[in-house]
Protein backbone atom coordinates (compact mmCIF):
# COMPACT_ATOMS: atom_id res chain seq x y z
CA UNK A 1 0.00 0.00 0.00
CA UNK A 2 0.97 3.65 0.40
CA UNK A 3 3.07 2.95 3.49
CA UNK A 4 5.07 0.35 1.63
CA UNK A 5 5.69 2.76 -1.24
CA UNK A 6 6.72 5.53 1.18
CA UNK A 7 9.29 3.23 2.78
CA UNK A 8 10.98 2.40 -0.53
CA UNK A 9 10.65 6.01 -1.69
CA UNK A 10 12.56 7.08 1.41
CA UNK A 11 15.22 4.39 0.90
CA UNK A 12 15.68 5.53 -2.72
CA UNK A 13 16.28 9.06 -1.47
CA UNK A 14 13.07 10.29 -3.07
CA UNK A 15 13.94 9.03 -6.53
CA UNK A 16 10.96 7.53 -8.35
CA UNK A 17 13.21 5.53 -10.65
CA UNK A 18 15.22 4.05 -7.78
CA UNK A 19 11.99 3.38 -5.86
CA UNK A 20 10.68 1.34 -8.78
CA UNK A 21 13.91 -0.68 -8.90
CA UNK A 22 13.86 -1.37 -5.14
CA UNK A 23 10.22 -2.44 -5.17
CA UNK A 24 10.81 -4.70 -8.19
CA UNK A 25 13.77 -6.38 -6.50
CA UNK A 26 11.74 -6.88 -3.32
CA UNK A 27 8.90 -8.38 -5.35
CA UNK A 28 11.28 -10.86 -6.99
CA UNK A 29 12.45 -12.04 -3.57
CA UNK A 30 8.94 -12.88 -2.38
CA UNK A 31 8.33 -16.64 -1.89
CA UNK A 32 5.87 -18.17 -4.31
CA UNK A 33 3.98 -21.29 -3.32
CA UNK A 34 2.45 -23.89 -5.57
CA UNK A 35 -1.34 -24.17 -5.40
CA UNK A 36 -2.74 -26.63 -2.86
CA UNK A 37 -3.43 -30.16 -4.10
CA UNK A 38 -7.01 -30.96 -5.12
CA UNK A 39 -9.33 -32.12 -2.37
CA UNK A 40 -10.38 -35.74 -2.08
CA UNK A 41 -13.94 -34.93 -3.14
CA UNK A 42 -12.68 -33.19 -6.28
CA UNK A 43 -10.49 -36.17 -7.15
CA UNK A 44 -13.35 -38.63 -6.61
CA UNK A 45 -15.69 -36.58 -8.79
CA UNK A 46 -13.38 -36.52 -11.80
CA UNK A 47 -14.48 -38.50 -14.84
CA UNK A 48 -11.35 -39.67 -16.65
CA UNK A 49 -11.97 -41.76 -19.76
CA UNK A 50 -10.15 -42.12 -23.04
CA UNK A 51 -11.68 -43.22 -26.32
CA UNK A 52 -15.10 -41.55 -26.14
CA UNK A 53 -16.34 -38.53 -28.05
CA UNK A 54 -17.44 -35.68 -25.81
CA UNK A 55 -21.10 -35.81 -26.90
CA UNK A 56 -21.25 -39.55 -26.13
CA UNK A 57 -19.68 -38.96 -22.73
CA UNK A 58 -22.23 -36.24 -21.90
CA UNK A 59 -25.19 -38.31 -23.13
CA UNK A 60 -24.05 -41.33 -21.10
CA UNK A 61 -23.56 -39.23 -17.94
CA UNK A 62 -27.05 -37.73 -18.33
CA UNK A 63 -28.59 -41.18 -18.71
CA UNK A 64 -26.64 -42.53 -15.72
CA UNK A 65 -27.56 -39.66 -13.37
CA UNK A 66 -31.23 -39.75 -14.36
CA UNK A 67 -31.40 -43.55 -13.92
CA UNK A 68 -29.66 -43.23 -10.55
CA UNK A 69 -32.34 -40.75 -9.42
CA UNK A 70 -35.14 -42.91 -10.77
CA UNK A 71 -34.09 -46.26 -9.30
CA UNK A 72 -34.14 -46.75 -5.50
CA UNK A 73 -31.13 -49.07 -5.64
CA UNK A 74 -29.12 -46.89 -8.01
CA UNK A 75 -27.76 -47.95 -11.39
CA UNK A 76 -27.22 -51.70 -11.60
CA UNK A 77 -24.68 -53.50 -13.73
CA UNK A 78 -27.55 -55.05 -15.63
CA UNK A 79 -28.88 -51.54 -16.48
CA UNK A 80 -25.51 -50.58 -17.97
CA UNK A 81 -25.16 -53.81 -19.94
CA UNK A 82 -28.71 -53.46 -21.27
CA UNK A 83 -28.00 -49.92 -22.47
CA UNK A 84 -24.72 -50.93 -24.11
CA UNK A 85 -26.50 -53.81 -25.80
CA UNK A 86 -28.98 -51.28 -27.24
CA UNK A 87 -26.00 -49.30 -28.54
CA UNK A 88 -24.76 -52.36 -30.43
CA UNK A 89 -22.10 -53.74 -28.08
CA UNK A 90 -21.84 -57.39 -27.08
CA UNK A 91 -21.75 -58.77 -23.55
CA UNK A 92 -19.39 -61.42 -24.88
CA UNK A 93 -16.65 -58.81 -25.27
CA UNK A 94 -13.91 -59.14 -22.67
CA UNK A 95 -14.43 -55.66 -21.09
CA UNK A 96 -18.10 -56.52 -20.50
CA UNK A 97 -17.18 -59.87 -18.96
CA UNK A 98 -14.68 -58.19 -16.64
CA UNK A 99 -17.28 -55.58 -15.67
CA UNK A 100 -19.80 -58.24 -14.75
CA UNK A 101 -17.20 -60.33 -12.90
CA UNK A 102 -16.45 -57.40 -10.56
CA UNK A 103 -20.02 -57.49 -9.26
CA UNK A 104 -20.71 -58.97 -5.85
CA UNK A 105 -21.89 -62.55 -5.58
CA UNK A 106 -20.98 -65.97 -6.89
CA UNK A 107 -23.62 -66.34 -9.59
CA UNK A 108 -24.15 -64.14 -12.64
CA UNK A 109 -27.72 -63.18 -11.76
CA UNK A 110 -26.57 -61.81 -8.42
CA UNK A 111 -23.69 -59.87 -9.98
CA UNK A 112 -26.04 -58.27 -12.48
CA UNK A 113 -28.13 -56.88 -9.65
CA UNK A 114 -25.23 -55.15 -7.90
CA UNK A 115 -24.79 -51.38 -8.31
CA UNK A 116 -21.99 -49.66 -10.19
CA UNK A 117 -20.42 -46.20 -10.24
CA UNK A 118 -20.46 -43.64 -13.03
CA UNK A 119 -16.68 -43.87 -13.44
CA UNK A 120 -16.76 -47.68 -13.74
CA UNK A 121 -19.69 -47.70 -16.15
CA UNK A 122 -18.22 -44.96 -18.33
CA UNK A 123 -14.86 -46.75 -18.38
CA UNK A 124 -16.63 -49.88 -19.62
CA UNK A 125 -18.33 -47.87 -22.39
CA UNK A 126 -14.98 -46.42 -23.47
CA UNK A 127 -13.27 -49.82 -23.31
CA UNK A 128 -15.94 -51.43 -25.48
CA UNK A 129 -15.68 -48.56 -27.98
CA UNK A 130 -11.89 -48.92 -28.23
CA UNK A 131 -12.16 -52.73 -28.39
CA UNK A 132 -14.71 -52.55 -31.21
CA UNK A 133 -12.53 -50.09 -33.15
CA UNK A 134 -9.54 -52.45 -32.89
CA UNK A 135 -11.53 -55.44 -34.12
CA UNK A 136 -13.14 -53.55 -36.99
CA UNK A 137 -11.95 -55.02 -40.26
CA UNK A 138 -10.24 -57.98 -38.62
CA UNK A 139 -11.01 -61.47 -39.85
CA UNK A 140 -13.15 -63.36 -37.29
CA UNK A 141 -11.70 -66.43 -35.63
CA UNK A 142 -12.51 -69.56 -37.60
CA UNK A 143 -15.76 -71.09 -36.40
CA UNK A 144 -16.69 -68.04 -34.30
CA UNK A 145 -19.56 -65.74 -35.28
CA UNK A 146 -18.54 -62.24 -36.40
CA UNK A 147 -18.51 -59.71 -33.58
CA UNK A 148 -21.43 -57.24 -33.72
CA UNK A 149 -20.52 -53.69 -34.70
CA UNK A 150 -21.74 -50.84 -32.51
CA UNK A 151 -24.19 -48.36 -33.95
CA UNK A 152 -22.88 -45.08 -35.41
CA UNK A 153 -21.98 -42.47 -32.81
CA UNK A 154 -24.85 -40.17 -33.78
CA UNK A 155 -27.35 -43.00 -33.33
CA UNK A 156 -25.80 -44.00 -29.99
CA UNK A 157 -26.12 -40.45 -28.68
CA UNK A 158 -29.74 -40.21 -29.82
CA UNK A 159 -30.65 -43.52 -28.13
CA UNK A 160 -29.24 -42.29 -24.82
CA UNK A 161 -30.93 -38.89 -25.17
CA UNK A 162 -34.30 -40.59 -25.75
CA UNK A 163 -33.86 -42.68 -22.63
CA UNK A 164 -32.83 -39.55 -20.71
CA UNK A 165 -35.88 -37.58 -21.91
CA UNK A 166 -38.24 -40.46 -21.07
CA UNK A 167 -36.82 -40.82 -17.56
CA UNK A 168 -36.87 -37.06 -17.07
CA UNK A 169 -40.53 -36.95 -18.06
CA UNK A 170 -41.38 -39.74 -15.60
CA UNK A 171 -39.57 -37.98 -12.75
CA UNK A 172 -41.25 -34.69 -13.56
CA UNK A 173 -44.68 -36.35 -13.54
CA UNK A 174 -43.93 -37.99 -10.19
CA UNK A 175 -42.78 -34.67 -8.73
CA UNK A 176 -45.94 -32.93 -9.95
CA UNK A 177 -48.07 -35.66 -8.36
CA UNK A 178 -46.17 -35.36 -5.08
CA UNK A 179 -46.67 -31.60 -4.99
CA UNK A 180 -50.37 -31.99 -5.77
CA UNK A 181 -50.81 -34.48 -2.91
CA UNK A 182 -49.03 -32.12 -0.50
CA UNK A 183 -51.05 -29.07 -1.52
CA UNK A 184 -53.33 -27.75 1.28
CA UNK A 185 -57.03 -28.51 0.90
CA UNK A 186 -59.15 -25.35 0.88
CA UNK A 187 -62.16 -25.37 3.16
CA UNK A 188 -65.57 -24.39 1.76
CA UNK A 189 -66.75 -20.86 2.46
CA UNK A 190 -69.02 -20.33 5.46
CA UNK A 191 -66.78 -22.00 8.02
CA UNK A 192 -67.64 -25.54 7.00
CA UNK A 193 -65.21 -28.34 7.56
CA UNK A 194 -64.27 -31.47 5.69
CA UNK A 195 -65.52 -34.51 7.48
CA UNK A 196 -63.82 -37.85 7.24
CA UNK A 197 -65.66 -40.67 5.56
CA UNK A 198 -67.38 -43.04 8.01
CA UNK A 199 -65.46 -46.19 8.79
CA UNK A 200 -66.88 -49.37 7.31
CA UNK A 201 -68.24 -51.82 9.83
CA UNK A 202 -66.67 -55.24 9.77
Image (cartoon, rainbow, N blue to C red):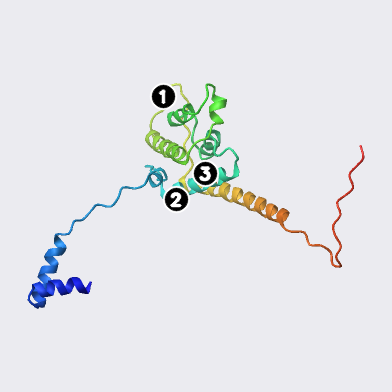
Report whether 187 appears left or right of 37.
Answer: right
Relative to the observer, which residue lies in front, 71 or 49?
Answer: 71
Residue 78 in the image, given as x and y percentages of width and height? 55, 33
Residue 43 in the image, given as x and y percentages of width and height? 38, 44
Q: Residue 133: name its quadrant.
A: top left
Q: Outermost residue toward the right?
A: 201
Residue placed under numbered mark 1 in the picture:
141
Relative to the observer, which residue lies in front, 173 or 164?
Answer: 173
Residue placed under numbered mark 2 in the picture:
55
Q: Residue at x 72, y 58 (%)?
A: 183
Residue placed under numbered mark 3 in the picture:
64
Choose mark 2 or mark 3, whichever is in front: 3
In the structure shown, which secondary structural element does the residue marked by tag 3 occupy? helix
In the structure shown, which secondary structural element does the residue marked by tag 2 occupy? helix
Q: Label 3, label 1: how many angstroms apart (C-alpha)?
A: 35 Å
Q: Is residue 61 above or below residue 91?
A: below
Residue 155 in the image, given as x and y percentages of width and height? 50, 47
Amino acid sequence: GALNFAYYFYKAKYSFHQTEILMLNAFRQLPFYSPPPPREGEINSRIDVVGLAEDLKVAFCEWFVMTDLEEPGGVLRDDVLELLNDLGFSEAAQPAKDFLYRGEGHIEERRRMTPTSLQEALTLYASLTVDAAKKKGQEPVEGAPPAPEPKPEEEQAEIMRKKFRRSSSVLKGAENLRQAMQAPVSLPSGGGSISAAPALSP
